[in-house]
Structures are given as C-alpha cells and as structure tokens.
Image: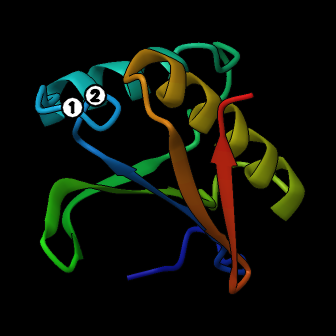
Amino acid sequence: MKVLKRTKAFEVRLYMGSRKGYGEEQYASHHVVRTISEFQQKTKQDEPPIPVRLTPTTFVSKDYVEEGWEIAVVRYPLREDSDEDIVQWAGDLAAVLMQRFQQEQISAVIRGELLVFFQD
C-alpha cells in the first residue's frame, strides 16, 4: 500500500448541545448533519469539502445533563488548507450552527486552548 499524501494533522473541535437554548426541545443528529452538509456545499466545485466528524457526547454538570455533539473540523490531506484556514472555517460553521439551532454558546478547542463563542 502506498501513501497518497502526508501532512501535519490538525483539527478544531466544536462542542454543541442538542437543546434549543436552555429549553426542553431537542434537535436530532440528522438535522445537524444536514446543516453541516449544506454549509460544506459552499466549497468550490473543483475542491473536496473540508471534512467534519460528528460524535455524540453527553454534557454533565451536577444535576444538569444534556446530549450533544463533538463536531471536529479536520485537515484533509488532499486540500491545501492552513491551520488558520481551518480555524476560520470552523468559526464560520459555529456561527451557522448557533443561529440554526438557537444555541446560547458553542465551545471550541483549538491547539489546546478553549474558546467559547456566544451570541451578541
């Protein structure tokens, strides 16, 4: 087996809950997948999209429990994206997810640093 291309690994991990705001209404994962896919459609036609890994997770804070997702935006070896390109794209995706799913905030882990995006 031959290696097609090798590059330095890089990813931005976004964390989003499944509840609309802090209410009881919850979004299903297929809605998140559709929103991410639609966002990826903005990629130029001659380029592969930036890949995203969607992993279910559970947030626990004492008596508060919420299902949600880790949304990892990963470097794809067949694209020539810089770390900053991926950070910008992930931030743009976070803004779309916050608006679409009425989130108060989305957390991101970038290079070992935790950022919290919130609505103005």
Residue wearing tag 1? 23
Badge 2: few (under 14), some or many (20 or more) residues near its Cα, within 10 Å?
A: some
| Apparent side of residue 64 relative to residue 15 in the rendered image (left or right) | left
**Nearer to the camera, 25 or 78:** 25
Q: Tell me the quarter of the image containing the N terminus.
A: bottom left
Residue appearing at x 58%, y 38% in the figure: 94
Where in the figure is residue 17, as x and y percent of width and height?
30, 48
Where in the figure is residue 4, as x and y percent of width and height?
56, 68
Q: Quadrant of residue 88?
A: top right
Is disc 1 placed on a helix, strand or loop? loop
44 w.r.t. 98: above or below? above
- Kindly indicate whether the residue at mark 1 contacts the one at mark 2 (C-beta within 8 angstroms): yes
**Nearer to the camera, 85 or 14:** 14
Residue appearing at x 44%, y 48% in the figure: 52
Q: Disc 1 marks which amino acid?
A: Gly
Q: CA distance from mark 2 to mark 1?
A: 6 Å
Check residue 20 in the rendering and tell me which mark sits there, or answer none. 2
Q: Is residue 21 visible?
A: yes
| Apparent side of residue 68 relative to residue 41 in the rendered image (left or right) | left
Residue appearing at x 66%, y 28% in the figure: 47
Q: Is residue 48 visible?
A: no
Where in the figure is residue 62, as x and y percent of width and height?
19, 80
Q: Tell me the quarter of the image containing the C terminus.
A: top right
Badge 1: few (under 14), some or many (20 or more) residues near its Cα, within 10 Å?
A: few
